[in-house]
């Protein structure tokens, strides 16, 4: 056997080199597949976290609108207007911050909520809160709240689906 190796060392070295190259290629291919899987899993986790964070922010927005409705009912237009203005500002920030994450339905809900809050604020501006004005304002704020709740539900459903 020793003489065979000595006489055919070039052929033996070629065969061993081919085997080692095949093993190295197999390991590299396996590592690449594992890296792709890990990358996909990280992307899914990031997307889920983004959806959950979006749902939490929508919950915070909801916590602005609900007290505003109570203030409208209590005939405190200045405080209600301030909360509604914060809600409008929050919605505009969310629309820009989450533009890549928001689905069409969520975006529509937020735009609709912003429009309703704007309408409520216009009703509050410079008017006394009589029964009719209060009812119109509460109706607009309630519609905004329903749109926010719908967007939050969509975000939570998408996060659970991932």
Image (cartoon, helix red, strand yellow):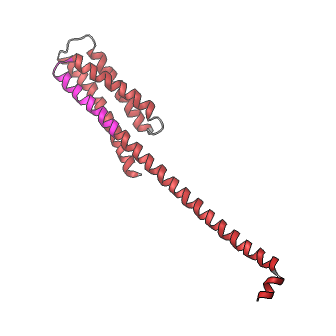
Position of residue 74 in the picture relative to residue 106 (left or right): left
Q: Position of residue 159 (x, y in %)?
A: 38, 48
Q: Position of residue 105 (x, y in %)?
A: 41, 38
Q: Which residues are magenta?
A: 56-76
In-front residue for pair 75/61: 61
Magenta residues, dominant SS class: helix
Q: How many marks?
A: 0
Query: Which residue lies at the image location 36% right of the left edge and 47% below the top edge?
Result: 157
Q: Position of residue 114 (x, y in %)?
A: 36, 26
- Which quadrant holds residue 131? top left
Q: Answer whether residue 59 is magenta in the image.
A: yes
Q: Compared with residue 129, is residue 149 higher up or lower down, i.e. above or below?
A: below
Query: Which residue lies at the image location 38% right of the left edge and 32% below the top edge?
Result: 110
Q: Compared with residue 151, is residue 30 higher up or lower down, i.e. above or below?
A: below
In-front residue for pair 12/116: 12
Q: Compared with residue 20, is residue 3 higher up or lower down, i.e. above or below?
A: below
């Amino acid at each position: 056997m020793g003489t065979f190796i000595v006489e055919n060392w070039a052929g033996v070295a070629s065969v061993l080199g081919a085997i080692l190259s095949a093993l190295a290629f197999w390991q590299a291919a396996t590592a690449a597949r594992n890296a792709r899987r890990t990358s996909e899993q990280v992307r899914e986790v990031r997307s889920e976290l983004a959806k959950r964070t979006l749902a939490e922010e929508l919950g915070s927005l909801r916590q602005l609108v609900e007290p505003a409705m109570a203030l409208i009912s209590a005939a405190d237009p200045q405080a209600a207007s301030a909360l509604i203005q914060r809600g409008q500002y929050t919605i505009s920030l969310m629309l820009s911050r989450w533009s890549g994450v928001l689905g069409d339905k969520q975006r529509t809900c937020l735009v609709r909520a912003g429009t309703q809050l704007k309408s409520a604020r216009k009703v509050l501006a410079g008017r006394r809160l009589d029964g009719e004005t209060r009812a119109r304002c509460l109706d607009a704020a309630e519609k905004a709240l329903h749109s926010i709740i719908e967007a939050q539900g969509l975000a939570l459903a998408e996060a659970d689906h991932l």
